[in-house]
């Protein structure tokens, strides 16, 4: 029996992270897995953090977790 251990962030249901740009958690993860390596590249691609900036800390947390 193979046991797959997943990050707690990966186990979260999809949810809205950036309300200004209407960006979902899954879109951020997909962008990171597609090559985004920092907040600037995620901002350029998805527009996260360019409005009110309230999502920046969470986006950075998702980024760090995915890049581990």
Image: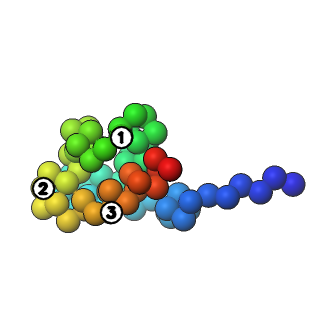
The reply, left or right, for residue 41 in relation to residue 2 is: left
Q: Position of residue 5 (x, y in %)?
A: 67, 58
Cα distance between the residues tagged 2 and 1: 20 Å
Q: Position of residue 56 (x, y in %)?
A: 24, 59
Cα distance between the residues tagged 2 and 3: 14 Å
Q: Mark 2 or mark 3, which has the lower sequence index?
A: 2
The residue at the point 53 percent across, 57 percent down is 10
Which label is found at residue 57? none
Task: Classify 36 as above or below 20.
Answer: above
Of circles 2 and 1, the one toward us is 1
The reply, left or right, for residue 61 in relation to residue 13 is: left
Cα distance between the residues tagged 1 and 3: 15 Å
Residue, disc 3: 58
Which label is found at residue 37? 1
Can residue 50 be spotted in the picture?
Answer: yes
* Label 3 residue SS: helix
- Residue farthest toward the left in the current orientation of the protein: 51
Of circles 1 and 3, the one toward us is 1
Q: Mark 2 or mark 1, which has the lower sequence index?
A: 1
């Amino acid at each position: 029996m193979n046991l797959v251990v997943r990050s707690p962030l990966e186990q979260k249901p999809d949810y809205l992270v950036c309300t200004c740009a209407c960006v979902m958690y899954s879109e951020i993860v997909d962008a990171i897995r597609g090559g985004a390596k920092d907040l600037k590249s995620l901002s350029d691609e998805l527009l996260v953090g360019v409005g009110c900036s309230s999502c920046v800390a969470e986006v950075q947390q998702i980024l760090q977790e995915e890049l581990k």
